[in-house]
Image: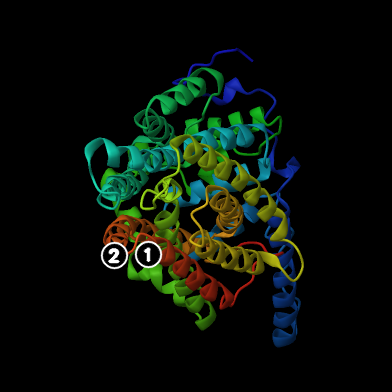
Amino acid sequence: MPAFVNPFKKNDVSDFEGVYVPLGQSQRHPAALAAAHDRKDSLAKDSVSDEKKLESPSPDHGDNSYSANTVEGLRAEIELEVAASGHDTPYDRKSRVVNKAISDIGMGRYQWQLFVLCGFGWLADNMWLQGVALTLPSLSQEFGVSSTNVRYTTCALFIGLCLGASFWGTASDVIGRRLAFNATLFLAGVFGLAVGVCRFFLFHLYESPKFLLSRGRQAEAVATVHGIAHKNKRTTWLSEDILNEIGGVTEAEEKQKLSIGEIVKRNLDKFSTQRVAPLFLTRKLGLMTCLIWFCWTTIGMGYPLFNAFLPQYLANSDSEQPTATRIIYRNYAITSIVGVPGSIIAAYTVDIKYVGRKGTIAVSTLITGILVFCFTASSDPNFQLAFTCLEAFFQNIMYGVLTPEVFPAPNRGTGTGIASCLNRIAGLCAPIIAVHAGEANPKAPIYASGGLFLAAFVAMCLFPIETRGRQSL
């Protein structure tokens, strides 16, 4: 493999020899095999029922109607998903075939490299929040602004987050995931630029195959999947013939494209009543949906009320003996480092019997809320350091589990999108509350943060669904 790669190269299937294997000889994902087995049982039961009713042998369905390694079996999988989603176009069918192909390839080197790359992207994003938080005490002294009014600075950050989440989500469907990701890294600043340079010349990021399908570039979409399989040293059964067999052959590429208007409409459709209604299909699911949205809202406000102004709280600027700047930065760094193992531990505790996801997130949220209140008990730097470290640790456990996986797959984007929107709006309101509440009592924003975490804990205890040991719906 060359040391430097061309980030703008268009890939072709011929670039990845030895990757393609016929569908009949491929290794399908266990979930696909299980679904095929269920279809076989269903057909067998229907056949027995028909024989009893007609008192004559039923026609032989053959193995093709339920085998996961035939085009007929693959088509049956797609038909079920299309019927559940409500969208039935060549693009929808072909994109679902691509999803199946990538799922069959499995997790490999390409995904792990992408995982690391996206991790650095999140790091660059989070550095802005931490950076602004660290500058608040200095900004207050430099410009003679009160320690409460200077908190309006974070409002600009959260406004940018709200606008960015709204714009780039749709923009990535128009200009492509690769360009949108690189552009946001570049705009994030020097650190983002450094990561982007490394990405350009050391790691070849393939364009999203579904984006390529939406723009009528089917051959490139197939080549992308072949490239992922080649990177992972695996094989794939995906070909243009299979896509055309299931999704249909279009006379012209333009007919397969989604216009910009259609892309925007599809994004807005996530929030339509038709997309929201299935989240309340049953009483249990409706209750779970409301509770998840409530938790995302309360945590979206509680987190920045404490963490966005933590350097100010550590400075003890309102006390008779303010903490030295060196100690503030030291304690802040230690707190951030101690919080890292929390997410790793959460990955294991969610699968412990009698604990699961519900127990993990509820207990960690309860402890987080209690520790936030304990932080106000003393202004001693060492005391505050101990409690901020514990708070960061359990807070990261909480964030490691906070996921809307209980939403049905066809409507998961809608449920997640609304939860994220509520989270951002609550985060935008946090600085305003911190300013006005802080004028009356410097510790009031901390009390509010702790109360919001405890309110989220109560909601989590009421979760009617536990997803431990289950696949997503």
Query: Residue 396, image x and y in percent?
Result: 58, 53
State if disc 2 and disc 1 touch (CB < 8 Å): yes
Type of amino acid under label 2:
Ala
Compared to 339, does 13 lie above or below? above
Q: Residue at x 61, y 39 (%)?
A: 238
Helix, strand or loop at disc 2?
helix
Q: Is residue 223 above or below residue 54?
A: above
Q: For residue 359, which numbered disc appears in the image?
A: none
Residue 158 lies left or right of residue 348; in this view the side is left
Where does label 1 land, which residue?
A: 444
**In the image, residue 174 above or below residue 314:** above
Q: CA distance from mark 1 to mark 2?
A: 8 Å
Image coords of residue 65 (percent x, y): 67, 60
Q: Residue at x 48, y 54 (%)?
A: 379
Which residue position holds label 2? 440
Q: Count residues near mark 2 (Cα–Cα under 10 Å), then give few for <14, some for 14-19, many for 20+.
A: few
Q: Residue 422 occupies which quadrant of the picture?
A: bottom left
Q: Residue furthest front?
A: 320
Residue 26 sits in quarter:
top right
| Residue type for callout 1 | Ala
